[in-house]
Image (spheres, helix red, strand yellow):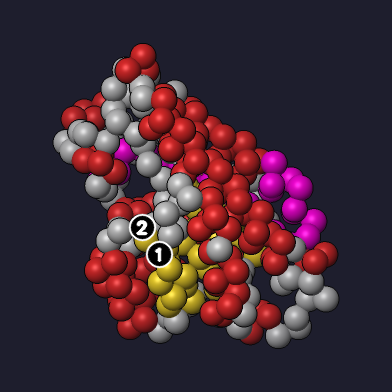
Amino acid sequence: MTDPAASDRRPVTLITGGGRGIGAAIARRLAADGHDLALTYRVRADEVRQVAEECCAAGSEVAVMRADLADLAQVRALVPSVLDHFGRITGLVNNAGITGTIGEFLDVDDDEAELVLDVNVLAPMLLAKDAIAHMATDRGGEGGCIVNISSGAAVSGAPHTYVPYAMSKAALNAMTTGLAKEFAAVGVRVNTVSPGTTHTEIHADAGRPNAPEERAPNIPMRRAGEPHEIAGAVAYLFSADASYTTGADIRVAGGN
C-alpha cells in the first residue's frame, strides 16, 4: 500500500558518480530542489565530501557511499545501503560512466571494453532493478523516478573515437524505453538525458583533455556544454512538470 504521507516527505535520490562533473552538478541542483541524497564515488573522497557539504548547506541530508561500479557485488549493496540510511528511495540517477581510451575501433582493448560495459550497462541495470523493486506501487512502494545519463554518442556511434562507449549508451537508451513501458502503470517514470560534449574530466580520463575545445567548431552552438546545463534537464524530469513524461530522451547537445 502506498504511504499517504509520502507526498509530504522529501524525495530520496541516489546519484552515482556524484562527486564531480555532471554528477556533482546534478547533486547541487537536486539539493536546491529539496532532495535528500545518496552520492557514490570510487576514489576521490575529498571531492564528494565537498559536494556533500554544499548539498547539506542547501538543506539536504546526504549519505556518501564508496563503490566501484565495475564490482557488481558492490553495486548490489548500494540500494540496500540507501534504505538502511533513509528508510526509502524515490529516485535514481545513473550518472557514473567511463568512455574507455579514445581511439580507433581495431585498437580497442578487450578487457577495457568489458569494463566499459560493466560500468555503463550492467551497473545501471542492477541499480534500476533494485530501485524499482522498492519504488513500484504494486510492491508497496510510493512510486519514483529514474534518470539515465546517456550520450549523443549513442546515436552517432562515435566512429574513430570510442565505439564501445557508444554501444553502452545505446544499451542504456534501450533500457530506458523498456523500463518506462513496463513500469509506467506502477508509478515509476524512467527517462534519459543525453549530453553532447561537456566540460568534464571524462575527456582527460580518455586521453584527450582538450576534446571539448577541439569539437566546439563542429557543434552548432560552437561550444561544449557545462555540467549545470545537464543538471537542469535532470531536475526537470524529477519535477512535477514532468509527471506525464516517461520514456523520453532529452538531448542537451548544443544542436548536435
Pinpoint residue 183: horizontal percent, then vertical percent. Answer: 75, 53
Res 9 quadrant in image: bottom right
Which residue lies under the disc numbered 2?
Answer: 42
Residues packed near mark 2 inside 10 Å, few (<14), some (14 to 19) or many (20 plus): some
Give how far across and how far down residue 30 sits, in percent. Answer: 44, 68
- The magenta segment is 178-199
Quarter that holds the C terminus? top left
Asked whether residue 122 is in view, the answer is yes
Q: Is residue 146 above or below residue 121?
A: below
Residue type beneath disc 1: Arg
Question: Which image quarter is the N terminus in?
Answer: bottom right
Earlier-in-chain disc, 2 versus 1 = 2
Q: Give whichever of 240, 134 is nearer the camera.
A: 134
Q: Which mark is residue 66?
A: 1
Q: Residue at x 37, y 41 (%)?
A: 98
Which residue is depicted at the point 49% across and 29% down?
167
